[in-house]
Structure formats: structure tokens, C-alpha cells
């Protein structure tokens, strides 16, 4: 993170990455234009900005702009004039309007999660480089024509107002990671799953909460012990009402509907009575030795996970790992659940044996109420994600890992 003193003193001269976050800014600091020829990433998140200067396109090298958690009501039209801009993040603002001219020609990754959007511009469908589009937690009822977005691989539409799954979504040739839960098309199934699982709730007061085990995008996970039985569990406490993938309620509904499987990490029960009113759930506590298969995508890889340098699999471990994940996906589909985020970073594995567990149902959706043909199409899209995983794992049996650029 940087400060305004860093900017005013000239300490940032020649900088490529600048982060001026949570500084209470109400106006764009024009001293940043001294970096117009070098700046590639700018993060202005967590301020009080409502606009950008009309000459913002002077940042001729800017590739990444984050401006989340600012009270913008309109996406600045000047962004469409930025020649190199390819990643735009305006999460949790107050956006109600996206002008046709606001989307950069090189747009690759657009984050508009948790805003007030009811419509999107037609120009969105005219961005052929688009790979990742995150629109969860808005008020959308339809999409513009996206047929030309042939590289779109990840699409988040959870918690909008779609009464049916957009048919064009099912035709996108590269789509592998869709999130569609929390819409009217799936909400009845979610409510039924939550109602059916209500008898399995655990009281927070019945838990002795121990150390923090980890933190993800949606919540914190603690080690806990049930006071009545002495059973050791993992406790997940959700951070907020909305995530990039949807809502905690949708995640819990999918997890309870999925049931238990040896290669799935699904909730044991909902936990009620959290002292701060937060949604929480109990999960099985895994033994030591489980590791994340990979890290999440980077700014450069966009939609593809980043494996640790030197990651290699023996053929036997690779086949075992993939068999475990395949079994978990088959179980989910048979139970009417679409995982939606079938990625290596959501897989835990044992390097010594290749045993694997698929986790994180934050993007999962229930398909019970959808037409059979759409269910089959969504499942085929999920198997496309599995094909990517298969290729990544097998490439690390005999070949060098993919190389990404400096971001």
C-alpha cells in the first residue's frame, strides 16, 4: 500500500503499480499523472470517489484498475478510451449505469459484483478478448448478445433476477465456470434444501471455538469442538451477505443438498446463534497433511490457476487425483448440484497418495427446477472445467508448467 505522502514526495516516480486504498479520497489525485507513461496497475479501492478525470486516458500503459468500494453510480465513460486497459474492478460501488462507451476495447476481465445494475450495454458483447465477467449480486434480468465473446470462460450471474438460465450462456463455446445460484430460477430449490436441513442445525453456544485455521474469500474457518459430544469440527463463519460467487445462503443450500461423499468437503449442519448474527456452518475437520492443489488465478493468468513452481505428479498420483475429483463431480450432478468453480485451488490433496477432496461450494447451484436439457448443458460445461484440470495435471507429469507474465 502507498500513501499520499509517497505520491507528493515523488517517491513513486516511475512506479508501475500504485495502491492508494482506504485513504478517504474524494477527488482523484492528479499527481498520479506524473506516472502516466509508466503506471500499469492502479488500485483506488475503499475511498469516496464518484468520478474520474476526463483526461484519465493519459495513462497509456494502464492495464489494471481497481476502484471497488467507492460510491460511483456510473462507470466512468473515459475508461473506454484507455488504450491498454484490460482489467476493470468496480465491486461494491453503487453502480446503476454502464455507458456503452465505458468498456475498454481490450477488456479481458470485468468485475461489477454487488452493485445496482438492471441492464448492461450492448458493447459488452463486442469485447472479443473478454475471459472473466463477474456480475453477481445485482438486479439483472437479461444479458446483452454475447455470441462474439468466444473466449469467455468464467461468468458469475448469481443473486440477480433471472427467472430462467439465459440460453446464450449455454452456447458460449469456452464457458467452464458459471455461477447462477440465488436467482428466481433456482431459489425455490435452495429454500427447500435449507428447510430440509433445518433439523440438523447446531447451536453456536454448543461450540468451543479454537484457533483460526484459514481464511477464504467468503469466510473464516476455525477449529471447534462440540460441547455435547466432544466431536472436533471445522467452523466456517461467513464474512458478508454477498460474495463474488453469490450468497452464503446459496452455498449452504448447495452443500446440504449435496450430502456426504468421501471426496467432497460438504457441511455437516448450519450453525445458528452466532453472537454477531453471521451465517455459519459446521464442516468435517480434515486430518493434517492435506494441501491445496494450486493457487487461484493471477492477474495475468485470469481464468487459470497458478501451480507452485516445480509442481510434478507421478502418473499414478495424477490418475488417482483425477479419479477422486471425477467421482465427486459425478456425485454432485446426481444430486442436482452444479459446482460452478471446479478449479485446482478448490481441491485438497495428499501428495503421497494422490487422494483428493473437492471443496468450496460458494459458486454451486441447484439444478432440480431447471429443464432437463439445460441441466445436461450445464453439466457439460462443468465437464469442460474438468478437462482443463485434467490437462493441467497431466502436463505436470511430463512437461514444464505454463509461464505467465510479470503480473
Image: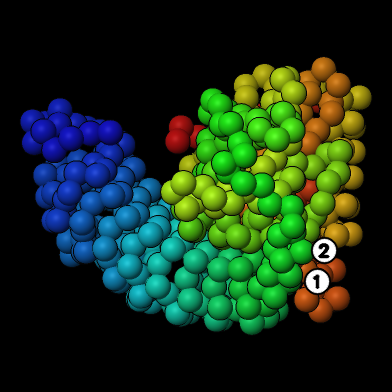
Residue 348: quarter of image:
top right
How many marks the image carries: the answer is 2
The residue most toward the left is: 9
Could you tell me if the residues under marks 1 and 2 are in contact, i.e. CB atoms within 8 Å? yes
Asked whether residue 150 is in view, the answer is no
Residue 95: quarter of image:
bottom left
Residue visible at 15% across and 28% down in the picture: 11
In 3D space, how far apart are the residues under numbered discs 1 and 2 (Cα atoms)?
6 Å
Give left or right: position of 184 versus 368.
left
- The percent coordinates of residue 164 (x first, y second) are 68, 80
- The percent coordinates of residue 82 (x first, y second) are 31, 58
Residue 171 position (above or below residue 222): below
Q: What element carries label 2?
A: loop
Residues 348 and 323: in front is: 348
Q: Callout 2: few (<14), some (14-19), or many (20+) C-alpha neighbours within 10 Å?
A: many
Labelled disc at residue 368: 1
- The percent coordinates of residue 328 (x first, y second) are 84, 46
Judging by the rendered image, the residue that carries numbered circle 2 is 336
Residue visible at 38% across and 48% down in the picture: 64
Residues 14 and 317: in front is: 317
Q: Callout 1: few (<14), some (14-19), or many (20+) C-alpha neighbours within 10 Å?
A: some
Give left or right: position of 204 versus 67.
right
Residue visible at 74% across and 45% down in the picture: 268
Amino acid at each position: 500500500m502507498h500513501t499520499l505522502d509517497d505520491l507528493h514526495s515523488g517517491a513513486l516516480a516511475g512506479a508501475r503499480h500504485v495502491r492508494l486504498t482506504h485513504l478517504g479520497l474524494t477527488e482523484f489525485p492528479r499527481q498520479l499523472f506524473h506516472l502516466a507513461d509508466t503506471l500499469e496497475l492502479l488500485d483506488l479501492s475503499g475511498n469516496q470517489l464518484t468520478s474520474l478525470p476526463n483526461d484519465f486516458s493519459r495513462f497509456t500503459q494502464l492495464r489494471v484498475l481497481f476502484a471497488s468500494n467507492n460510491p460511483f453510480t456510473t462507470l466512468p465513460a473515459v475508461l473506454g478510451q484507455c488504450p491498454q486497459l484490460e482489467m476493470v474492478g468496480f465491486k461494491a460501488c453503487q453502480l446503476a449505469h454502464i455507458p456503452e462507451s465505458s468498456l475498454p476495447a481490450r477488456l479481458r476481465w470485468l468485475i461489477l459484483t454487488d452493485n445496482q445494475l438492471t441492464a448492461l450495454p450492448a458493447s459488452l458483447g463486442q469485447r472479443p478478448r473478454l475471459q472473466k465477467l463477474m456480475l453477481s449480486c445485482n438486479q439483472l434480468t437479461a444479458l446483452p448478445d454475447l455470441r462474439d465473446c468466444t473466449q469467455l470462460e468464467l461468468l458469475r450471474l448469481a443473486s440477480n433476477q433471472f427467472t430462467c438460465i439465459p440460453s446464450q450462456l449455454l452456447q458460449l463455446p469456452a464457458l467452464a465456470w458459471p455461477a447462477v445460484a440465488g436467482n428466481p430460477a433456482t431459489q425455490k430449490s435452495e429454500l427447500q434444501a435449507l428447510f430440509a436441513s433445518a433439523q440438523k442445525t447446531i447451536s453456536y453456544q454448543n461450540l468451543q471455538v479454537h484457533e483460526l485455521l484459514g481464511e477464504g474469500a467468503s469466510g473464516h474457518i476455525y477449529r471447534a469442538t462440540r460441547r455435547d459430544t466432544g466431536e472436533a469440527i471445522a467452523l466456517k463463519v461467513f464474512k458478508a451477505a454477498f460474495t463474488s460467487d453469490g450468497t452464503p445462503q446459496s452455498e449452504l443450500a448447495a452443500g446440504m443438498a449435496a450430502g456426504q461423499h468421501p471426496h467432497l468437503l460438504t457441511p455437516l449442519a448450519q450453525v445458528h446463534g452466532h453472537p454477531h448474527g453471521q451465517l455459519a456452518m459446521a464442516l468435517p475437520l480434515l486430518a493434517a497433511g492435506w494441501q491445496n492443489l494450486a493457487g487461484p488465478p493471477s492477474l495475468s493468468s485470469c481464468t487459470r490457476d497458478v501451480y507452485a513452481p516445480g509442481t510434478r505428479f507421478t502418473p499414478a498420483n495424477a490418475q488417482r487425483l483425477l479419479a477422486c475429483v471425477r467421482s465427486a463431480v459425478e456425485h454432485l450432478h446426481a444430486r442436482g448440484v452444479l459446482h460452478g468453480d471446479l478449479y485446482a485451488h478448490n481441491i485438497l490433496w495428499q501428495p503421497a497418495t494422490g487422494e483428493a477432496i473437492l471443496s468450496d461450494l460458494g459458486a454451486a447451484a441447484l439444478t432440480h427446477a431447471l429443464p432437463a436439457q439445460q441441466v445436461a448443458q450445464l453439466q457439460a460445461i462443468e465437464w469442460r472445467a474438468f478437462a482443463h484440470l485434467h490437462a493441467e495435471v497431466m502436463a505436470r507429469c511430463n512437461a514444464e508448467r505454463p509461464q505467465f507474465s510479470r503480473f
